[in-house]
Amino acid sequence: MTDKTAGWPGDMTARERSERMIRVDHAGEYGAARIYAGQLAVLGRGRKGDVLRHMAAQEQEHLRTFQALIADRRVRPTVMLPFWHLAGFALGAVTAALGEKAAMACTVAVEETIDAHYQKQITALDQTEPELRATLGKFRDEELEHRDTGIAHGAEQAPAYRLLRAVIKTGCRAAIALSERI
Ligand SMILES: [Fe+2]
Ligand SMILES: [Fe+2]
């Protein structure tokens, strides 16, 4: 995100910047919840079911928080939501069908991307939005826990781990760019 000075044509005001952050974060948490739902549909009864349910429950809380912010601040959600609904679930279900370790590799890729994204936002917010900043900090810590959980449960032993991780990260970054703009 580029730093712009308010007042010039095409520049973002602080409010627009926060709205854009909330829009993309809502989209991201929506997608994350759907990824875990897709994983649970395949692996919910397996050995990793409880691990996945714990992460899924945290994503639901993240999502609820952004749903409330969207409503309170009257932010328009991204038009991409119906697509993330399907794409998120498909990503979770397909990686889970490849196996538990591939599902965990997906988690690592997604959570690493979200960590970097939240970190960028936290830096950009500075002291202007202390509450939002604190929320992002808490969620970022939990996303890092999810990444660590993925690694602890064998993500790196997934077949074609590096390729899988790179492809998913690229997809997530594209999803973030789209959800910020439209
Ligand atoms: Fe999350
Ligand atoms: Fe997460």
Image: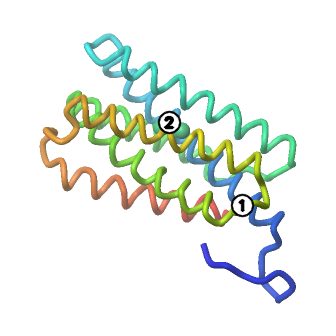
Whole-percent x, y for residue 81 in the image: 62, 46
Whole-percent x, y for residue 135 in the image: 67, 42
Whole-percent x, y for residue 142 in the image: 50, 36
Q: On the picture, is 26 further left or further right than 156?
A: right
Above or below residue 176? Residue 132 is above
Which residue matches tag 1?
A: 20
Q: Residue at x 61, y 52 (%)?
A: 80
Q: Earlier in the sequence, mark 1 or mark 2?
A: 1
Residue ranking furthest to the bottom = 8
Which residue matches tag 2?
A: 142
Q: On the picture, is 79 further left or further right than 167?
A: right
Which labelled disc corresponds to residue 75? none
Q: On the picture, is 175 further left or further right than 62?
A: left
Q: Residues within 10 Å of mark 1 (few under 14, many from 20)?
A: many
Q: Is mark 2 within 8 Å of ligand 2?
A: yes
Q: Quadrant of residue 153?
A: top left
Q: Looking at this view, is 81 or 180 the one in front?
A: 180
Q: Are marks 1 and 2 in contact (CB under 8 Å)?
A: no
Secondary structure type for disc 1: helix
Kind of residue indicated by mark 1? Arg
